[in-house]
Image (cartoon, helix red, strand yellow):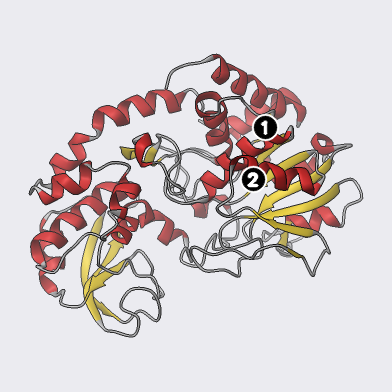
Amino acid sequence: MNVSRRGLLAASTTAAGALALGGPAAAAGAAGTGPAGGRLRTGFERLAADGYALLDGDRVGVVTNPTGVTGGRARSHGALAPVRHIVDVMHADERVDLRAVFGPEHGFRGTAQAGGSEGRYDDPATGLPVYDTYQKSGQALAEIFTASGVDTVVFDIQDAGARFYTYIWTLYDCMEAAQLAGKRFVVLDRPNPVTGRAALGPVLHEEFASFVGRKPIAQAHGMTVTELARLYNGEFLKTPVPLETVTMTGWRRGDFYEASGLPWVPPSPNMPTPDTALVYSGTCLFEGTNLSEGRGTTRPFELLGAEGVDRRWAEAANALELPGVGFREAYFAPVFSKFEGKTVGGVQLHVHDRERFDPVRTGIALLVTAKRSWSGFAWREDNWIDKLTGSTQVRTMIDAGADTDAVVDAWQRELSTFRHIRAQYLHYR
């Protein structure tokens, strides 16, 4: 990865998009100054406020899921604006020629569990055809865009801030497919719910590329979807897609989700709250082990455990005195997924200082202490942990007895390189 002509092209395209939605003042607001009163405006809200001028004359398709909403905040007279899906809003607006919807993992309306989708159907509310993008990429996905008859593909999905959360790779796959199909691509921005302050964790090695990590970015990327789109266009796509991004106003890199004032819509069934997103980039690593990552409980990714685990794990984790977090000895019975219907022992994470909490270091520390305190610890047989961490390094170092600091230190050089590249594509202060 390096500074490239494509990177400059992506940056200039984004700037043009920002100016088209309100001129220099709007572009300055997107850099963090915010509108009057500091109210955050999402990419969709700015697009709508501009009368959908960016989509004028185009047949439009939208890649989205239940998080693509607007409203849910108090109006000037005090009443709460209803929360409505952007597809319903645009479908009812004669200024938009909306022709199709494209659903990712879990589906457009969010009815499918992890690893599932809704398939092809006509949306009962709007009558629009809904196409399934899950596990489709390249020419196969390009053919879906072509068959839909759209000119422009719009992306609006709430991310969770972790490399292995699949929506950011739906974004990548759709950008690539739009380029192959000769379509324009527009990305509408939403907040990174766990801030955009820093990139954390190991960087993916490309030989471990999968749908939980297509390209070499950090485990916690610290970017918004418009920033990621610019990065993809500038560094990873062989041929850049005609890209325009509609950024937010009123968002700063240090903001956690609550600062946005936006309603939280679970982006997937096991991401019920912003608290889940806060720990997810670290504790999702337990998907690569024989321990439960808390799926099937009311606190997924905050509860971790297995049959035979006892108080010694929480004691070992607390002894590390990790910044911003403590661990409670916990017992729970998942209603689905690993250990369905069985009572297991483990830990619950309690984050008491979000500013100091490092989710990736914490996830590594929990893997190290789990292996040392419970003799039954094992990696998944398919070495899924290598796909999640992006290489064999974490697994082999922990197996060799490395402590948390040694594991974290091992990825710092690659992380530093990624941070340098990332900086070229950051839009917000």
Q: Residue at x 33, y 39 (%)?
A: 200
Q: Position of residue 336 (x, y in %)?
A: 40, 78
Vertical comparison of 396 with 53: above or below: below
Looking at the image, tell me whether mark 1 or mark 2 is earlier in sequence order.
2
Check disc 1 and give the amino acid type.
Gln
Q: Position of residue 4 (x, y in %)?
A: 51, 15
C-alpha span from label 1 to label 2? 13 Å
Q: Is residue 269 visible?
A: yes
Residue 85 appears in which quarter of the rendering?
Answer: bottom right
Give the residue at mark 1.
Answer: 179
Q: Is residue 194 left or right of residue 75?
A: left
* The N terminus: image quadrant: top left
In this view, the residue in front, 124 or 53, is: 124
Q: Residue at x 41, y 75 (%)?
A: 298
Q: Position of residue 362 (x, y in %)?
A: 24, 52
Give the residue at mark 2.
Answer: 140
Secondary structure beneath dot 1 equals: helix
Q: Is residue 241 left or right of residue 152?
A: left
Q: Residue at x 52, y 68 (%)?
A: 113
Vertical comparison of 84 with 156: above or below: below
